[in-house]
Image (cartoon, rainbow, N blue to C red):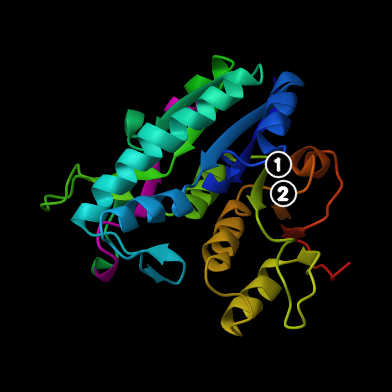
Amino acid sequence: MYGPPIVVKIGGSTLNNQDTSLKDLVALHKNGFQIVVVHGGGNVISQWTQKQGIRPQFVEGLRVTDAASLEIVVAVLTGLINKELVAQIHSLGGKAMGFSGIDGGSIEAYIAKPELGYVGEISHVNTEPIEAILNSGYIPMMAPLGFHRNDGSDHSGNPLNINGDTVAGEVARALSAERLIFLTDVPGIMDANGRVVRRLDPQRAQNLMRSGIIRGGMIPKLDACLRALETSSYADIIDGREPKALLNCVQGQNFGTRISKRISSDR
């Protein structure tokens, strides 16, 4: 293995999909890249909450999580999606270790917005468990959960739901990752005319968010990219549905949006 790790955020939609994301992860790992994966699962969580008569609600791309929803979130992320992804990695000849941000005290968080319920804002990332998995030759496969920091409140030590995009950005920042890559189901960040913005710097990214051009679920993704840029060189938001999208991105072929510290243009 060589170089700082690459943090990859994959959506829960990767499960049972025909894209090559998991094959790409295995290929990169076998070729010596250190890969850390943070996975989502929003669609599957929504399906399970609806089965229980709970209607999904979102505020600026963040899931509102009451006590009943939290039980479903924890069960689906750690007991279903995480294990299925790990099993698929192994079926492809790879090596992955599944865990959540609760395990090893990896993700410490607190409730910053009570109106969102049991949704955590990350206060600290403990990279030791992640690095231990990397050093053992496995791909860390992280479910985006955390534990409430010990602050004397009734919530101390309780599990918290954390947006997977946010977790990916904070993990990349804490690890001083080489880069952060988001595999999404869109071609990249779109401008007001519906064209993919190929290059962004932090200032223009902030302008696009303030103007309302970037909204919904893309907001936490772009916020995560900006956080990662504090210690990483760049971040990419690409269409994971495209064949070999992840491999091509790592090999320097950029078909989505790249966010970097340098002043950039659309091309």
Q: Is residue 124 magenta?
A: yes
In this figure, what is the number of numbered marks? 2
Q: Residue 241 bears which disc, if any?
A: 2
- Quick one: 197 or 230, which is closer to the camera? 197
- Quick one: 253 or 5, which is closer to the camera? 253
Q: Which residues are magenta?
A: 115-131
Percent position (x, y) of residue 243? 79, 42
Compared to 218, does 102 lie above or below? above
Q: Residue 19 bears which disc, if any?
A: 1
SS at mark 1 in the image: loop
SS at mark 2 in the image: loop
Compared to 263, does 49 lie above or below? above
User: Could you tell me the amino acid type at mark 2?
Assistant: Arg
Residue shown at the point (41%, 64%) measured from the top left = 62
Percent position (x, y) of residue 134? 56, 22
- First in sequence, mark 1 or 2: give its number: 1
Side of 200 where 168 appears, left or right? left
Side of 131 where 57 appears, left or right? left
**Spatial CA span between label 1 and label 2:** 5 Å
Residue shown at the point (56%, 36%) measured from the top left = 37
Q: Is residue 60 magenta?
A: no
Percent position (x, y) of residue 72? 29, 47
User: Could you tell me the amino acid type at mark 1?
Assistant: Asp
